[in-house]
Amino acid sequence: MVYLEKEEDFKKEIEKGDVLVDFYATWCGPCKMLNSVLEELEEHIERVKIVKVDIDSFEDLTKEHGVMSVPTLEVYHDGKLVKKEVGYHDFDTIISWFLK
């Protein structure tokens, strides 16, 4: 899992391959529950990069992506947004986004 450290790194992180971006907050209960699901996903599908974006640290990026609730998950393939989902999702649901 990659925790975004600088806003300017975002585009570089999503530009190649399959990437799941998790817009989260440290104070968010469903975000904490989702973290264990993402850890499990990381173990099962190595080709998917997971990028975590703390909405309190990256307010401009959060607004730019229209994030109104957390968690918000965005799926990218080679830099192109292909899916956006809001709220907690279980392992089976999230893994299905990448098994095609």
Image (cartoon, rainbow, N blue to C red):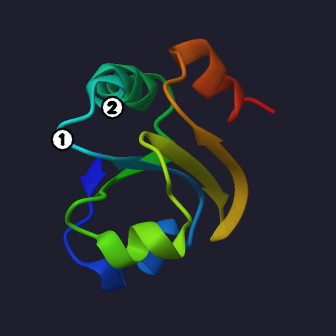
Which label number is shown at residue 31? 2
Residue drawn at 36 percent across, 24 percent down: 30
Q: Secondary structure at mark 1?
A: loop
Amino acid type of the residue that numbered disc 2 sits on in the rendered structure = Cys
- Asked whether the residues under the numbered discs 1 and 2 touch, taking CB atoms below 8 Å apart as contact, a structural biologist would say yes
Q: Residue at x 57, y 39 (%)?
A: 86
25 up-or-down from 68: above or below: above
Image position of 73 with respect to 92: above or below:
below
At label 1, counting other C-alpha atoms closer than 10 Å, the crowd grade (few under 14, some 14-19, many 20 or more) is few
- Give the residue displayed 19% in from the left and 69% down from the top: 5
Question: Residue extending furthest front?
Answer: 68
Q: Give percent across and percent down for residue 66.
A: 56, 65
How many numbered markers are drawn? Answer: 2
What's the residue at 28%, 70% (across, down)? 58
Looking at the image, is 14 positioned above or below residue 12? Answer: above
Can you say which quadrant of the picture contains the C terminus? top right
Q: Earlier in the sequence, mark 1 or mark 2?
A: 1
Q: Amino acid at mark 1?
A: Thr
Q: Secondary structure at mark 2?
A: helix
Residue 46 placement, left or right of 53: right
Residue 10, position as x, y percentages in the image: 40, 74
Q: Quadrant of residue 95?
A: top right
Residue 57 lies left or right of residue 91; in this view the side is left
- Determine the residue located farthest toward the right in the rendered image: 100
Q: In the figure, residue 3 lies in which quadrant?
A: bottom left
- Residue tagged by mark 1? 26
The percent position of residue 49, horizontal first and vertical second, equals: 45, 49
Q: How far apart in space, not on screen, are marks 1 and 2 (Cα)?
A: 8 Å
